Amino acid sequence: MSDYAAVLDRAAAGGRITPEEALDLYRSAPLHALGSAADTARRRRYAGTEHIATYIIERNINYTNSCVTACKFCAFYAAPQSDKVWTRDIADILRRCAETVELGGTQIMFQGGHHPDYGVEYYEEHFAAIKKAYPQLVIHSLGASEVEHMSRISGVSAEEAIRRIHAAGLDSFAGAGAELLPARPRTAIAPLKESGERWLEIMEIAHNLGVESTSTMLMGTGETNAERIEHLRMIRDVQDRTGGFRAFIPYTYQPENNKLKGQTQATVFEYLRLIAVSRLFLDNVAHIQGSWLTVGKEAGQLSLHYGADDLGSIMLEENVVSMAGAKHRSNRMEIIHLIRSAGRVPAQRATTYEHLLVHDDPANDPVNDHVVSHLSSTAIEGGTAHPELKLLASS
Ligand code: SF4
């Protein structure tokens, strides 16, 4: 293909592009033309609110690092027999939920390893306890990999597992574990995980049960450009049937403390191109999220001009990618500044992307620095595992 302009114009206007066209654009289209077309597609989709870019306040709660799956890119897990294994009890988890509410967070992401003993019952018990204590918190957590694991432990179908944890309090799936969906790169980095087809099958079951999700992609572990686009195709095909993916969130592999150490990461250039192609190719997915956590704040800002409409979250706690080397931290005031100085009006959003608070007047911006990422993370300097909130305590 040589006529990039015609394909970009079609995609920007809402027309569908083929995987072959997407790959050609990703490899070869001029960067600025690609970004401009993606931004046009974003503006068209959000006509009337195209001036807004969103963020959310949430907390990742890591309940255990014990994991039988041993993914090669992971710096978080410990083998179940290791003396490095830890688990958090329910009191600890509820305290973390309380702090989330106290700081204005609206969502928790329950995130942990594939513990050899944690079946459906474990998640039912914990989600029910969280919902009972904090019904205002949205539980946006887990993904197809956890469903596959817990259903195996409990000897039930994936459908039954989803029905039960949804009834207990899970609101939506975070889409964890997608990594790379095509078989070759997936097997290379996560040989013990379910196949990409199975991951999508479980997400489709969830969507058909009314449990929506986001979708993710881990970039930069040695996959080819064609495999990146194939990942997008696999998601788009399921989305055509279910409409259950609310968002697509690519993020970049971090090389520290894991078995893939030494391989190259995806560059900012590759990342921005993928954000743009995602907006153009995934014509059936509403939200494209930029990730300041893994690619940095400036690249996160730029993503808002390459098709992203959301800058993700201020994570009060995050350990999984931080342990692999992502050291970027931020706070609410800074996220607001990043979005505003990128030419957009910032808005705090809900899990389902409704605008909770539009920061359209800088005079009314929050003026305290309590809402800080990694406030209680153990994986990053400045975080704390101490049961008290340092910043609140010192105010
Ligand atoms: S990515 Fe998840 S499943 Fe894989 S080793 Fe880490 S904790 Fe386990």
Image (tube, grey):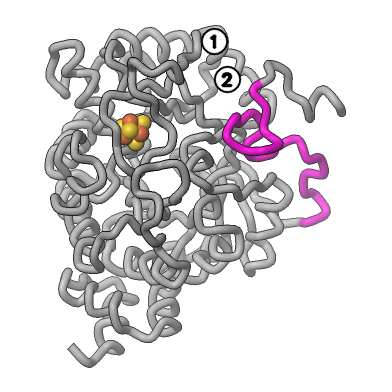
- For residue 178, above or below residue 307: above
Q: Quadrant of residue 391?
A: top right
Marks 1,2: beta carbons within 8 A: yes
Q: Which of the two discs, 1 and 2, sits closer to the camera?
A: 2
User: Amino acid under label 1?
Assistant: Ala
Quadrant location, ligand no. 1 = top left
Residue 110 screen position, x and y as percent:
44, 26
Q: Residue placed at 42% from the left, 24% from the top?
A: 65
Q: Is residue 367 magenta?
A: yes
Q: What is the spatial separation of the Cα atoms under label 1 and label 2, in whole angstroms?
A: 9 Å
Residue placed at 47% from the left, 27% from the top?
A: 138
Magenta segment, prevailing SS (helix, strand or loop): loop
Which sits in the foreground, 250 or 54? 250
Looking at the figure, which quarter contains the N terminus? Answer: bottom left
Judged from the image, the secondary structure of the residue bearing numbered disc 1 is helix
Numbered label attached to residue 93: none
Whether residue 25 appears in this view of the structure is: yes
The residue carrying pointer 1 sits among few (fewer than 14), some (14 to 19) or many (20 or more) residues within 10 Å by Cα, namely few
Q: Nearer the viewer, residue 152 or 277?
A: 152
Q: Residue at x 19, y 18 (%)?
A: 151
| Residues in magenta, as a range | 362-385
Q: Position of residue 274 (x, y in %)?
A: 36, 66
Which amino acid, by three-letter code, is at mark 2?
Cys
User: Going by the image, does 10 lie left or right of 338?
Assistant: left
User: Split into 4 quadrants, where in the image is the C terminus?
Assistant: top right
Q: Which residue is disc 2 drawn over? A: 97
Residue with the mark numbered 1: 133
**Residue, far right:** 395
